[in-house]
Image (cartoon, rainbow, N blue to C red):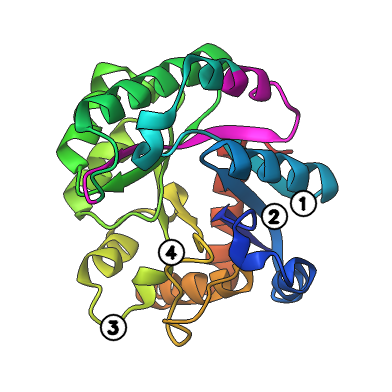
Amino acid sequence: MLFDTHVHLNAEQFQEDLQEVIDRALNEGVSTMVVVGFDRPTITKAIELADTYDFIYASVGWHPVDAVDMTADDLVWLRELSGHPKVVALGEMGLDYYWDKSPKEIQKEVFRKQIQLAKEVKLPIIIHNRDATADIVEILKEEDAAEVGGIMHCYSGSVEIARECIDMNFYISLGGPVTFKNAKKPKEVAESIPLDRLLIETDCPYLTPHPYRGKRNEPAYVKLVAEQIAQLKGITLEEVAEKTASNAKKLFGIK
């Protein structure tokens, strides 16, 4: 049974056919999903989905691109939501230096506040990183994020940095890019990182795996990610599915 650790079924791209998308995922053997919220509307929808489906859980956090919009009230709200029985993580949070909507210093401040909150409420964190690896690693160390650990979501960095993150109690999550023909780094990571520190995800509707690249991504396609990892490691799809699901359940505290 496959565990997709990062979906955005709360995105507008799924408004028209959400139930069909969920049914296709179940038919492909996806047994559990975490819907990730990153601002007020998407967090509200993530909680709603977790309340509706017993196999869906939620993560709540503030996206670095929108850090400039986050208020003190939002942080209080995240603290309140962290007590919800289906909320299993805080995030996605982190740094994004590709888009320039939120100044870097504000992004860092919001990131640190969310790590501190996670330690307070004892939940793992889901890290969004775009063009900001050095600063993210530095902040995780300074804030002692190893205390709660978490996920390097849709990891695209080097094997060396992946090992550094594992030393800080993080799992490495691979998505659609590991199936891309020219994606050298994700393939190296899939080969090199032990299976007991790997997770799988789609980040749907984004980052659709081959051969559907360019179309809308959906949770059913997490099987393609697992198949690629199995091929690179020379093991069975069942082994990848079973171990990554057990890793996710352990991290999120799901029985």
Mark with earlier residue (1, 4) = 1
Helix, strand or loop at disc 2?
strand
Which image quadrant for residue 8? bottom right
The residue under label 1 is 55
Residue 26 falls within the magenta-colored stretch? no
Q: Which amino acid does label 2 sit on?
A: Thr
Image mark for residue 175 = 4
Left or right of 51 on screen, residue 8: left
Mark 3: few/some/many CA within 10 Å (<14, 14-19, 20+): few
Mark 1: few/some/many CA within 10 Å (<14, 14-19, 20+): some
Helix, strand or loop at disc 4?
loop
Residue 90 falls within the magenta-colored stretch? yes
Residue 13 x/y as whole percent: 60, 67
The residue under label 2 is 32
Q: Distance between the residues labelled 1 and 4?
A: 20 Å
Helix, strand or loop at disc 1?
loop
